Every structure is written in C-alpha cells, then in structure tokens.
Image: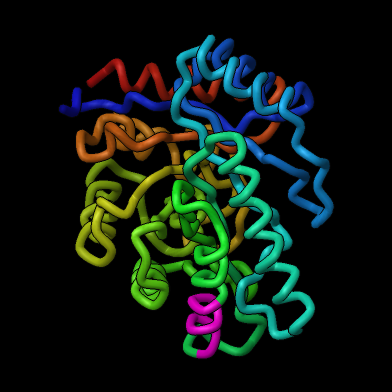
Amino acid sequence: MSTGRAKWIGAHMPTKDGLGGAIRNGAAIGCTAVQVFTNSPQTWRAKPITPAMVEDFRAAREETGITHVVSHDSYLVNLCANDPAKLENSIRGLIAEVTRCATYGITKVVSHMGAHLGAGADVAIPVVAESARQVLAETDPSVMILMETTAGQGSSLNANFEELARMRDAIDSPRIGVCLDTCHIFAAGYDIRTADGFTEVIDRFDAVIGLAALQAIHVNDSLKPFGSRLDRHAHLGEGEIGPAAFRALVQDARLAEIPMMVETPDADTDHARNVATLWAFAREA
C-alpha cells in the first residue's frame, strides 16, 4: 500500500566503476533507485559481459538493497529510420540492449524510440511498432521497454500523450510501458510549474494512457522555457519549472511506487544534492 510519498528516488549514475560501482555510488548519495547505461550510448559496439561483471552487479544490489534499477538505451536507436541499414542497426542495437539487461537482471529499458525525420507520425508509428515487435520477439520476456516522453525537438516522436498512446496501442504488448521526463513534457507544452498544474497533467496522462503504464520517471528541471521543444536539463528548482512540480511529484500518492531518477547536470558533484532535494520534499508529505 502507498505511503503517500515517493519511495524509489535516485539518479542516473555514471558507470566508470562498472555497473556494480554505479549501484554502490548511488546508495552512497541516498538513492533507492538507479538508472545506468549498460554500454556507451554513443556507439553500437559493446564490450562483452563477463560473469564477474554480472556477479559484481548482483552483489552490489544485495549489499545496498537497491532493487529498482533501470537501463537507458543508446541515443543512436531510431526504430523508424528511413535508411534500411540504420533501421536494422537500431533494431539490432535495441535487441542487444534488452539482452544485456536480461543478463544482468535489469527488467526495464528506457528508449526514445524514434524520430520521423520528416515523414510524419502517421508514417513513422507503424514502422516503430513493427520494429518494436521484432525486438520483443527476439528478446527475453523478463525485460520491458519504456517509451520515453520527448521534448519534441526536431522530429522526435512521443512529445504528446496521444502519440504515446497510439504507439503503445500499435505495438500491443504488455512489455511496453512509459517513462515520463519532467523536463521533456514541460518543453513539449505541458505546464507543470504549479502543484495544480502538475496534478492536471498527471490526470491527463491517466486519461489518455493510464497510470498503470507509467513505470519510471526522469526528474529534471528545464533550462529552456515552457513550450520551447528544447531538451536541456537543469538542477531541480533552478530552471524554468521551479520547485512546486517536484514537491507535487514526490507527494502524489498515485506515483509513490514508481522509480524517480534525476538526470541533472554534473553527476559527480551535484546528483547528491538533487537527490537530497527530492527526499526533503517527500518528507514534507
């Protein structure tokens, strides 16, 4: 049963000390949830996963008690790329990511899914759906893919809830969920600057998609103004969104069981204070 406030608060942690190190370093700054890259997000190449790497990761989870771990896929993935070679690389790349997660025991992968590159959403969504179904068919069923809300920068898909709902319906799999990013939805035109505004946006998400689909939240302030369609993260309470949204987020009982992870700048020096800010807001509930 929900306590009425967030339980799983954390950050996207650097993996310079390995995935096990990311979990331990997350715990050291107060995380109860952690997001990681299982591979460099800027390349298709991946280092082989050794049994020792998996053992260390699982030991770190046991040591810290952090059970909520989410992966983020490569920034190169575009499941509706109009170049056949790029589309095939994207499908294979996401298959590899989901497979790595299954090897580690990570059950959720966040993906931007795609950009239509001028073709338009009506053309792109069926291509994404076909690509995603292929990924799901060739991967371990223990891992979900979470479609991330985007700021709508360029031709990125999923900048509005209706588009997310269309894509989810087109893929038609229980292994497809959603990751909401506060910076992205604000930049895309969802005004969450007040507690009432935040509640109205979550109500809208529930009406269009359903809160059962919401499996992760990226918690970021926005460097750019409302409706800018620009994806630029800022420290919590120091950007254009301001503190009210983040206070409402961690105090909304409907969201209490969803992992919430900051992706704010300067991870090594500032993740600790952003995580602490969320816990402080949660304790006010």
- Image check: 17 left or right of 69? right
- On-image quarter of the C terminus: top left
Q: Would you say residue 95 sits in the magenta stretch? A: no
180 sits left or right of 220 in the view:
left
Q: In the visual, does 29 lie left or right of 45?
A: left
Q: Is residue 124 magenta?
A: yes
Rendered location of residue 9, percent (x, y)? 43, 26
The answer to whether 77 is drawn above or below residue 97 in the figure is below
Q: Residue furthest left?
A: 1
203 vs 168, nearest the viewer: 168
Q: How is the image coloured?
A: rainbow
Can residue 182 be seen from the camera position used here?
A: no
Q: Residue at x 24, y 36 (%)?
A: 252
Q: Is residue 229 above or below residue 142?
A: below
Identified at 67% across, 40% down, the residue is 37
Q: Which residues are magenta?
A: 123-130
Q: Is 196 located above or below residue 33 in the figure? A: below
Taken as a whole, is the magenta stretch helix, strand or loop? helix
Quadrant occupied by the N terminus: top left
Identify the image quadrant of residue 263.
top right
Residue 81 seen in the current view:
yes
Residue situated in front as seen by the camera: 173 or 184: 173
Residue visible at 36% across and 39% down?
Answer: 245
Q: Nearer the viewer, residue 243 or 79?
A: 79
Q: Is residue 18 above or below residue 165?
A: above
Q: Nearer the viewer, residue 221 or 149?
A: 149
Query: Disc count in the image?
Result: 0
Q: Quadrant of residue 55?
A: top right
Measured as percent of width and height from the top left, residue 250 is found at 32, 31
Residue 131: horizontal and vertical position, in percent? 57, 74
What's the residue at 34%, 70% (across, down)?
A: 165
Residue 130 at what x, y percent from top left?
52, 79
